[in-house]
Image (tube, rainbow, N blue to C red):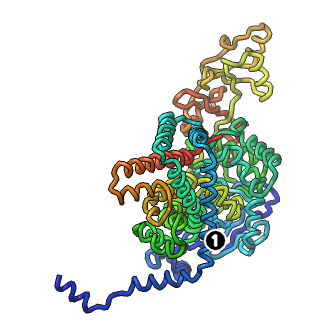
Amino acid sequence: MSTQKSTKVEVKNLTKIFGKHINKARELSRQGKDKTEILKETGATIGVDQASFKIYDGEIFVIMGLSGSGKSTLVRMINRLIEPTEGEVLIDGENLMKIDKKELREVRRKKMSMVFQNFGLLPNRTVLENTEYGLEIQGVDKTTREQKANEALETVGITGYNDEYPDQLSGGMQQRVGLARALANDPEILLMDEAFSALDPLNRTDMQDQLLDIQERLHKTIIFISHDLNEALKIGDRIMIMKDAKVIQTGTPEDILTHPANEYVEEFIENVDRSKVLTAGNVMIRPTIVNIEKAGPRLALKMMKDTEVSTAYVVDSRRNLLGIVDANDVIKLVRDKNGDLTSIVQTKVPTTSEDTPISDLMDDISQTGIPFAVINDKKQLLGIIVRGAVLGALAGNEVSDFE
Amino acid sequence: MILNSLILGSIPQLPLAHWIDNFVDWLVQFTGFFNAITNFIGSINNAFQWVFDLIPIWLFIVLVLALTFYVNRDKQNWGLLIFELLGLLMIWNLDFWRDMTQTLTLVLTSSLIALVIGIPLGILMAKSHTAEIILKPILDFMQTMPAFVYLIPAVALFGIGMVPGIVASVIFAMPPTVRMTNMGIREVPNELIEAADSFGSTEWQKLFKVELPLAKTSLMAGVNQSMMLSLSMVVIASMIGAMGLGTKVYFAVGRNDAGNGFAAGLAIVILAIILDRLTQSLTRSHRK
Ligand SMILES: Nc1ncnc2c1ncn2[C@@H]1O[C@H](COP(=O)(O)OP(=O)(O)OP(=O)(O)O)[C@@H](O)[C@H]1O
Ligand SMILES: [Mg+2]
């Protein structure tokens, strides 16, 4: 994505060995013994084994691997929540291993923030107080930090919940707060350890879209851990695959799909025909939605004008899909001073479910002019699939996010 | 039997009692130090007592009721309020009022000291593995040693009266506060500790903004237990001259006076229930 590709984070030979007999374990590892053998012989666990890679400024770098492959350990060594056994982490060329506690604190406060799998929100603090945490400990005054926290909350799209407590919010909302808290410090680097893994599929897709959306505006360097290939392909500018504490391959999603480094990666991506991997949920975009219980023709028309579309999707207050309206029909209604949209709703809309593979929809999509509506089992409208997005996704471009 | 005494006869007896005597004797030379402590504890005790003597009985009852009302503001407990009113009126009626305030003073003073020493110890224990290893057996010892035993060195070092009673109570009552503080902090989810660290908190910030607030419920449960334990010490403490309801019970035992003994015992129970319920409601978090 970025053309200049300046290096933001460089990791050299980073190794973590847990337990006792570290030297022995290291030696065995150098002799080429694998993790299980070393554990058996020494009782030490190799968490990460000599990882080296570069992360470029402004990219989303996804680290993938199965459970226990060392992803969390690796990301925690980047902010030294876990002290590496050996190796280096360079941030903007500065060696993080060489700085003292106080300087490390400064780096954590100013340069990077972390988002956690289970959100890591403080249950005794409100949404606003949680979001302010990073600024509060820096001694930023109350008004400034409130303002910055509010900005961050707005960025992630939760306003009006400032005084709620985390346990009063849904998982998706809590993680938005987690993200807002990380953004409030305006860090250059975001570390996200399986940040969306605890969310249900709908929320996860939404958060992925939102992250891409935010990234478009803020251009952070994001290190994102995932064990979900779809997620990695969707949000990653580059992907790194780990196995048994070792880095197996680093590359763009295309690279990984087309030139898997070895059998393991091959298996991992298991003959990924993108059309099989990509589901309706992956390529759907946000339609222009009109709530028939609230909006009349004028509002509908304005919304369609604002989003520059000629078709709007009509739903009721529970977001159940009723049909579509065409801009020309709406204009007629407005001219006739008819305030009710019902008469012009076209109910014949092709629908599909979120996890339908794109390959199953391809034929229909290329034949019908009307986009598919993606609905869930409660018939609620989730998004729509337009031809351009499908073709783009198949060609390997990033799917244009909900816009 | 015979075998037993043969074995005992052939092994020289461990001079444990002798050693401890020596140790206590050795401690006694630091009279100045122990006098200072005596004065310090004595003055806390007197301050409480002074306040309780100053407050008219009706006002005291109103204050207790108001406090109960306030700490239960989310969900009123009318039964408790009625119980408190009747219980306190009964103590007054039985002419145990001053004894009750003396006992309350002893409990509050020793709980306060247990808290001031116990919470930092609990924090230390949570933070340092070494501290935990050292403190754990000491706490077990403090709590399982029959409370009577503390009276002996307490008298040797602090004389007789309220202060040695308080000291013995503190030693006996402190372990739950230490333990529960330790436990509360250790049980803070790792992800929250990581969150605090990852944003660059100092150790103190982490302690005051994350660990202690999250350990609060557990910590308060410890304080509650400590308070109950120190209340259980009042009769024992009365043997070395700590005044209060315990004294009434103790004297009644000497005079084989079941009536008065039970009456004073009942007053202790009433006080215990009030203190227990009050500290328990403090434990519950009130959200703004
Ligand atoms: N504190 C620790 N002490 C000992 N071993 C550890 C510790 N933390 C992690 N490990 C081990 O290091 C290896 C890597 O763990 P890590 O948590 O980094 O994996 P992961 O890729 O994040 O897995 P998951 O997807 O389950 O989160 C595992 O074998 C794990 O058991
Ligand atoms: Mg992990």
Question: Which residue lies most toward the front here?
Answer: B255
Subunit under mark 1: A
The C terminus of chain B: image quadrant: top right
Q: Quadrant of residue A167?
A: top right
Residue drawn 62% across the image and 77% down it: B33
Tell me: residue B174, above or below residue A142.
below
Side (left or right) of A69 relative to A90: left
Q: Nearer the viewer, residue B54 or B225?
A: B54
Q: Position of residue A289 (x, y in %)?
A: 69, 26
> Dot 1 surroundings within 10 Å: few (below 14), some, or many (20 or more)?
some
Q: Residue B86: image x %, image y %?
A: 48, 37
- The residue drawn where x is 66% and y is 60% is B206
Residue in the image at 58% along x and 45% along y: B285
In the image, residue A56 above or below residue B15: above
> Residue shown at 35%/57% (left/top)?
B255
Q: How many marks?
A: 1
- Which quarter of the image is occupied by the N terminus of chain B? bottom left
Q: Quadrant of residue B58?
A: top right
Towards the viewer: B277 or B205? B277
The image position of residue A224, as x and y in percent, is 65, 55
Q: Which residue is mark 1?
A: A83
Work out whether B54 lies above or below B146: above
Query: Which kind of residue does numbered mark 1 sit on?
Result: Glu
**Residue B281, visible in the rendered structure:** yes
| Label 1: which secondary element | loop
Residue A244: tell me if it is visible: no
Q: Residue B168 at x, y = what percent?
A: 49, 67
Front residue of A395/A224: it is: A224
Q: Is mark 1 within 8 Å of ligand 1?
A: no
Image quadrant assignment for residue A63: bottom right
